[in-house]
Amino acid sequence: MNEPASIAPRTDRTRIRRHAERAAPDRIEEILAGGLVAHIACTVDGEPRLVPFLYLYEAGRIVIHGSPGSRTLTRLGRGWRAAVSVCLLDGLVASRDAETHSANYRSVVAFGTGRRVGDTAEKRRLLERTTERYFPGRAAGRDYAPATDRQLEALEVIEIVLDEASAKVRSGPPLGARDADPDAPGSAGVFGLDGVTPVDP
């Protein structure tokens, strides 16, 4: 799946510097659509704020929701800029040498502008899509009572329209100088997130 040109890497801030060979601009949308938590950062009252959100990715935008009392959501609803990070951790990479331990992952860093979603029908659609994303096959009116208009009006729904992003991916086995040598001391391999269960890299 190719990302829209509007959110491709465009400036120096989305250039992959460390391990540039891991840049994966053609996987931006795939990763954004597959992640479970988006960390949203913006500046509030002169200080950085970073908040994790469940989210929906749709057509070049991240959709989040929460209390109208949230300072982060309030600022984003006024059109403030934000940075977004999504990371999927696929495995832990153990090496025979300390410096070449790593992880297999897929990650995106994106930048965009917040905007408040005020239309009640659109809020309902976006929130029901978010629920279905986390609970596939679950439908309003069949599996749970739909939100009332009053509940929707009391909820802040924000879209962050993305204009630039970069993706970085690591996969495969450990790459330390001694990791491919079965006679070298120590051990190496790719493990599940429990750090114990071997997995196919």
Image: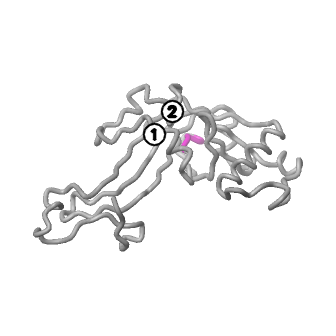
Pick the front one: 27 or 168 = 27
Pick the front one: 97 or 25 = 25
Check the image and name the residue furthest to the bottom: 196
Q: How many marks?
A: 2
Estimate the x, y position of residue 34 in percent, counting from the top left: 54, 49
Residue at (39%, 38%) from the top-left corner? 24
> Toward which corner of the image does residue 166 lie, by quadrant?
top left
Residue at (73%, 43%) from the top-left corner? 126
What SS does tag 2 mark? loop
**Label 1 Cα crowd, 10 Å radius (few <14 / some 14-19 / many 20+):** many
Query: In this image, 8 relative to 92: left or right?
Result: right
* Mark 1 or 2, nearer chain start: 2
Q: Name the quadrant of the C terminus.
A: bottom left
* Coloring scheme used: one colour
Query: Is disc 1 in contact with disc 2, using a CB cutoff of under 8 Å?
Result: yes
**Residue 27 got which mark?**
1
Q: Main secondary structure of the magenta part?
A: strand
Q: Residue 155: within the magenta?
A: no
What SS does tag 1 mark? helix
Q: Which residues are magenta?
A: 41-45
Three-letter residue code for mark 1: Arg
| Residue that label 2 marks | 3
